[in-house]
Amino acid sequence: MKKPKVLILRTAGTNCDIETATAFRMAGAAPELVHVGELAGKKKSVFDYAILAIPGGFSYGDDVAAGRILANEIKSRVKDLRGFVRSGRPVIGICNGFQVLVKAGLLPQTPSGEQTASLTFNDSNRFETRWVRLRINLQSQSLFTKDLPEMIELPVAHGEGKFVVKSPKVLEALKKSRSILMQYVNEEGKFSSYPYNPNGSLFNIAAITNPVGNCLGMMPHPERYVTRYHHPNWTRQTFCKEGVGLEIFRNAVKYVLN
């Protein structure tokens, strides 16, 4: 069976591309690192790939704001990215990739492509890096979380991860369309403030999707938990055979193969 091709979008400052490519390779795909300039210059087309991933890092040094410059570059020079999302093919933006998707107006999805949300500085005013507990919205249409348990753990590492919206209507639309995929929770699975919510995100939002579920933006890093040995408590989690993050990538690969 031919392995589906995955476009791992990179630019100056991207630093999680190798890990993301490794995760997709472990999931049975054929990842390829592609510089945004290759797409902007028409040397390569996003439609040559089955899956698109925008990995974490600090694109363009997070100048102006995290993900802003790459988002502007996508809007002005890689306009077929919006068509790729509309085609139904899987798209995942992780951490800086989530910031890019939001600031490019791809998430939350609107008919006009207007930016209606943002990811801004953590309430703690410092870089937050820790493992967090997440509750998955099992009613979401997201293809990425199929068959995952309701409660999972993943690591975060960001300075601008606070999810905010332009108006209360945006949050209500996310709720109504079941586009809120993951939320930060405490050990009991309940909403809680810092440090359980590491950045102060509105409604404890950690990840959102478009309504049909093929485009995912998330602040936690699934590529950093693809083997049980990634977890700091792995010696005591004898029931865990592999990292739960790997299943997120595997779900995308399964989707394009079916």
Image (cartoon, rainbow, N blue to C red):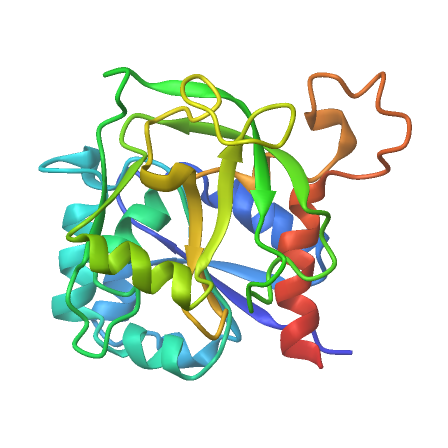
Q: Residue at x 73, y 48 (%)?
A: 149
Where on the picture, by quarter, is residue 155? top right
Give residue 152's position: percent from left, percent from top.
66, 38
Give residue 208's position: percent from left, percent from top.
42, 54
Task: Give the number of callouts.
Answer: 0
Q: Is residue 217 shown to the viewer in this render?
A: no
Apparent side of residue 11 relative to residue 130 in the rendered image (left or right): left
Task: Look at the picture and state if 4 lies above or below 240.
Answer: below
Give residue 255's position: percent from left, percent from top.
65, 74
Q: Residue at x 67, y 63 (%)?
A: 251
Task: Work out which quarter of the rendered image holds the N terminus and state it.
Answer: bottom right
Task: Look at the picture and state if 253 lies above or below 25.
Answer: below
Residue in the foreground of this view, choosing between 39 and 129: 129
Q: Residue at x 29, y 54 (%)?
A: 171
Task: Look at the picture and state if 4 lies above or below 47.
Answer: above
Q: Residue at x 44, y 17 (%)?
A: 195
Task: Work out which quarter of the rendered image holds the C terminus and state it.
Answer: bottom right
Q: Is residue 231 shown to the viewer in this render?
A: yes
Where on the picture, by quarter, is residue 174? bottom left
Apparent side of residue 164 relative to residue 9 in the rendered image (left or right): left
Residue at the extreme right of the image, as rendered: 238
Give residue 137's position: percent from left, percent from top.
57, 53
Apparent side of residue 3 relative to residue 235 in the rendered image (left or right): left
Residue at the extreme left of the image, as rendered: 64
